[in-house]
Amino acid sequence: MSDDKHDGIGWHADADDLRAYARGELEAPRLWSVDAHLIACAPCRLALAEAGDPLALDAGWARLDAELDAPRPGVVEALLTRIGVADHTARLLAATPVLRASWLSAVLLVLAMTVASVYTADSPWLFLALASLLPLAGVALSYGPVLDPTYEMALVAPLHGFRLLMIRTVAVLVTSLGLNGLATLALPEYGLRALAWLLPALALTTTGLALTARLGPVLAPALVSGGWVALLVVTRATTHGTLVPFTAAGQGVAAAIAVVAAVSLHRLRDRFDGSPSPSSITDFAHRSAS
Amino acid sequence: MTTHPTVSASGLTLRYGGTAALDDVSFRLHEGVTGLLGPNGAGKTTLLRVLATAVPADRGAFTVLGHDPGTVNGRREVRRRLGYLPQTPGFHADFTAFAFVDYVAILKELTDRAARHREVRRVLEAVDLSDVRGKRIKRLSGGMRQRVALAAALLGDPDLLLLDEPTVGLDPEQRMRFREVIAEAGQGRTVLLSTHQTEDVAMLCRRVIVMAHGRVRFEGTPAELTARAAGRVWSSAERDPQARAGWRTGLGAFRNVGDPPKDAELLEPTLEDGYLLVLDGEPVEVASA
């Protein structure tokens, strides 16, 4: 609204905008400005009535009513929309179970404790082990039925299951990796070695997801986590110094596993659109409920 | 009644361990409300979950408006035509009623903001919740939450509505209100309403399916189910040992169902009587659709 006319209450909508609005052709975000303005400005509502045909006007009012009902987005949702995320994607992200305060504080607590353990034990291995595992735990909980109260509704929704999984995975990964990164900053004396969790974290997450397509959302991440812990216990018992996964060679293997798992995940994407296998644990709770 | 059924199911079987939750279940659903009656453990929830594509059957098949949910594309088409109210619908309790239904609308692929918000308003109005749309779900009563979940199921005007015991846990007034909403929702679409209350069926349903132990025991109209008990209900001062089932009515006498003695004082049968007789190991006779 470059040539808006101003008066005592602020500005008035441009006549061309009002005509486009009446025809239903005004695009967002200009559309939203005019929507918001029309609520407050009687002269512009009158001008709109003259500018448009009655049918289009009714549609305009219906849209305005719907906007008035629309919930105010939360802080995260508003931020996401501001940086260009589509409003429906932002809503899906805001409903991602693990992006809740309780989960985030649990992750922060675990990281703080493991960072503290680095100072007392003078070795970063516990921090590296847990920081590698936290993103997988977050992704698994955001996809499975454990934390998502609307799991059953989401399961039978036509939105592609893989798309929802990816939206949530990216959100959880960005958050988890960000928190891990912050924790890493508290260990400056280890330099880049303190970042050795990153590739294992990606490898564990992608492997867990790829196996989810076959084994379901509970068994797959549980197996991968168990395997990771077993690997660390064995290597700690048999080697001195840096644990194998955090050596240069281990990092290379982790990167390779992450790539292979990501490729298989993409190949198996249609499986996330299907019904889970009847033997998966998600249905266990329903066995006696029929 | 339309000639083409909305749902056509044949031989649906699903076993959990050694137990058959569904055992060779076949039926057809047409427009209007069909009641799915049965005691706890009869397989009602499992059947609804299979039809909702939440879990696949081990054997057998079904179609919704000709779409086969056994394929990825068919399943998506079925989901696009489906409204599903699970037995215990979950909520994001911090969301307002509007925000929650809006979230489900996004899952149902309504991505255009203005059109989606119009649809959310429409369904909230249909379940009479327009006044509390801005309230957080955790502040709503059980009946209102149930209606929020129904509103979410009504999004996109689905051809098939699956309702799993929606009146459980509601007080009598809420139950009446909910029945009105279901009756309204049943206009021009196919509704399968799982319930263990014959009252729901008597008030709402054009047809009824009775299930027990994973099998269909009866399929027909409520009147046909009632007719099963014609000449097989009688009154006595004490429980008649000959009766298959009996209960003391509010008037003090016993109401017996089964094979009456010769001198019995026969009573007019009700839907409950027919239901009890069908459940009590009667041979399965499926009435034609």
Image (cartoon, helix red, strand yellow):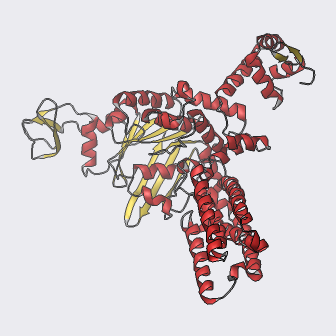
Give percent across and percent down for residue A66.
67, 26
- The quadrant of the rendering that contains the C terminus of chain B is top left
Compared across the picture, whether B288 is left or right of A27 comes to: left
Instruction: Report whether residue B256 is seen.
Output: no
Left of A83 or right of it: where is B152?
left
**Left or right: A7 with respect to B67?**
right
Q: Nearer the viewer, residue A117 or A182?
A: A117
Q: Residue at x 37, y 67 (%)?
A: B18
Is residue A233 visible to us here? yes
Residue A155 is situated, as x and y percent measured from the top left of the image, at 57, 51
Name of the residue lying farthest toward the right: A3
Q: How many labels does the image show?
A: 0
Viewer-side residue, B188 vs A220: A220
The x and y percentages for residue B137 are 52, 36
Q: Residue at x 58, y 68 (%)?
A: A220
In the figure, A193 relative to B165: above or below?
A: below
- Kindly indicate the quadrant of the structure image that contains residue B94: top right
In the depicted view, which residue is nearer to us: B284 or B278? Answer: B278
Q: Is B56 situated left or right of A134 in this image?
A: left
Q: Tell me: residue A146, above or below residue B162.
A: below
Q: Where is residue B44 in the image (x, y as percent from the top left)?
A: 40, 49
Quarter of the figure with residue B37: top left
Residue at 51%, 25% in the rendered image: B128
Q: In this view, does B45 lie above or below A271?
A: above
**Which residue is painted at 42% across and 53% down in the image?**
B25
